[in-house]
Structures are given as structure tokens and as C-alpha cells.
Image (tube, rainbow, N blue to C red):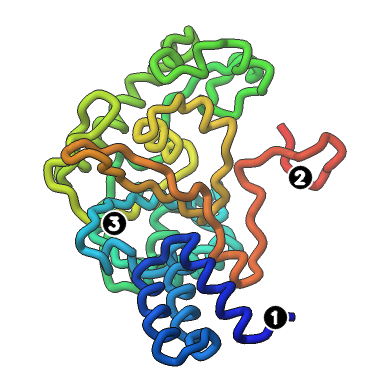
Amino acid sequence: MLGLESRGKVYYNIMIGLNFSDRRRDYEKCAKKDGYFSSCLPVYWQYMVEIGRDFAGMGRDTATRRKDVSIMKLLIVRHGDPDYTMDSLTEKGWREAGLLAERLAQIETRAYYVSPLGRAKDTASLTLNKVHRTAEECGWLREFHAPIRRPDAGGREMIPWDWLPQDWTADERFFHIDRWQEAEIFRAGRVKAEYDRVTGALDRLLEGYGYRREGYLYSAERPNNDTLVFFCHFGVGCVLLSHLLNVSPMVLWHGTCAAPSSVTTVATEERRAGTASFRMLAFGDISHLYHHGEPPAFAARFRETRDNEWERQD
């Protein structure tokens, strides 16, 4: 076990390595004044708490503390564990929404947007009540609706994801941002038209906040530190990410799983003045559940092995 003096030096080196410059300067002043590191541990812990909250998305934005940096953040939140028969939440889903509300209430947010579907509105309601705010209801945030006749569905119309891996990976086009919509099944289901409707609405919204789409990037006409929260669904959430990150939605629909009540965070990067791109900082984060010992729901996943009879099968 390291003594306080040794631990203080270790913590100081951690701050140097992670470039926590602001608090590091406070730490250096403390160390020079007192002549040893251990008395400065409170300074270290204070900053680590701040950084930890930022990493988990549970605290005030770093950009809010440092006005010289403009970072727009979009939080894409999936609804809590769903009761699809009632378009609401299960008992577990309401617990998840409550824990989510505790988390989101600590984040300084410019605006909230919500799907018109009940399970998303119910999830949002606990956060909105806690912060005494309202959300704008957006039809384009409802679950992505473009039914197709999937190869495994026997001619029935289905959602455009949850394909069998051996079916969708057999078509090379599905891996490409500019070709995934060319598949005959998608053309018949007007998937691209719905995709364009959703992403077009997103771009119009972002333009109102100062970011105008130009090709695969955004013109940062009014860079800002705004945080926007979207309460929606897994399928449409992947569509939004597909557009922001320039990735085929098929890859996201089938290669990721955003658990109920999870938070996905994307932020702008303006490496050259006037041109912004979006980077995903966290996907499907459910730290608010783990923090309170609430296990994640299995929704949106399939059984890990065929022998796991207690898990979802198709």
C-alpha cells in the first residue's frame, strides 16, 4: 500500500498524463506552498470528481466551465424498458427512467426533443418534471418506420433491422454509406425516402443552432456549447448516428445495441475554423443503472448462445 506522499505523486503524474491542466496548476501551487503532495489530495479529488462526472455525462459540461472551447453535444436517449402492448414502460422501465432523470437533471441542457410515441414520452416525463422543463415533440423522432419484406420473415412486412447476419452481410452494399439503400428490398420499402426525411429534419434543426450540413461535414456558422437531448428509440437513434458519423445504418442496426434508458453522446469537433464534424464520445451508456445496482434490460438483443433459453430468440 502506497503512503499518502507516494499516492499524491502518483495522482499528480496521472493528471500530467491526462492533461488535466486547470486543476493540475492548482495542485502544483499547493505542492510548492506546502512542500509535499499528500496535503494536496483534496485538490486532486475535487478535480477527479469533476472529470468523472464529465466522462459519465453526469455533470456540468466542460465547455460550460471553459468558454474558450465551443463543443455542441447531442444526447440520444433510448426509452426505458418498453411495454410495447401499451406503448409505455414496464415497471423496470419506470425505474430506469427515474435513474436516468437523476443523471440528466445534472446536465445543463439547451433544449429537449421527444418522440411522439408513449414509451419515449413516458421516459422523458420524469426528467422534464425534475428540471421543470418541456420538450418539443418531433414526429421524425418516432421509431424509424419503413417496413420491408426481410428474407427471413416469410413475406411479412418487418422493421428494416434484425436481419439474420448471414443474410445482410452477404450483400456488400450494406456496408457502404452511399450504397446501402440500393438493395432491392430497401427500394421496395422506401427506406431511403424515410431515412432522408428523418436526417433532413435533423439537419434543419442543427442549422437553427448554427451548424449547416455541407456534404459529409457541417459548416460551423455559429459554434456553441449547447447540449440537446433527444428522447427516442434504437432504430431511429441509429439513423441519426449514421448521418452524423457517415456510416451505413445497417452496420449500426446490427453491430450495436443501445440498452433501454441508455445515453449516446456525440459532440462537434472544429479542428479548423468554420468546419465541424461529429464524434461519438459514448454509445449506449448505462452508468446510471450500474451506479444504483439496476441490471440492464435485455431488450434489443438476441440470446448469446442457442442454449440460453431464458434469453430472447427469434
The type of residue carrying mark 2 is Glu
- In the image: residue 57, left or right of residue 155: left
Mark 1, residue position: 2
Residue at position x 37%, y 82% in the image: 29
In the drawing, what numbered circle is on residue 292?
none
Outermost residue, right side? 307
Q: Nearer the viewer, residue 133 or 165?
A: 165
Give the foreground label among 3 and 1: 1
Outermost residue, left side? 221
Res 33 → quadrant: bottom left
Res 10 → quadrant: bottom right
Q: Residue 165: percent from the left, percent from the top?
A: 66, 22
Q: Earlier in the sequence, mark 2 or mark 1?
A: 1
Q: Residue 8: percent from the left, percent from the top?
A: 56, 80
Q: Earlier in the sequence, mark 3 or mark 1?
A: 1
In the drawing, what numbered circle is on residue 227?
3
The type of residue carrying mark 1 is Leu
Q: Mark 1, residues whose alpha carbon is within 10 Å: few (<14), some, or many (≥20)?
A: few
Mark 2, residue position: 311
Measure the C-alpha gap from mark 3 to mark 2. 36 Å
Q: Is residue 140 above or below residue 118?
A: above
Question: Considering the numbered disc 1 on the image, is that residue within a helix, a strand or a loop?
Answer: loop
Give the foreground label among 2 and 1: 1
Q: Mark 3, residues whose alpha carbon is within 10 Å: few (<14), some, or many (≥20)?
A: many
Q: Mark 2, residues whose alpha carbon is within 10 Å: few (<14), some, or many (≥20)?
A: some
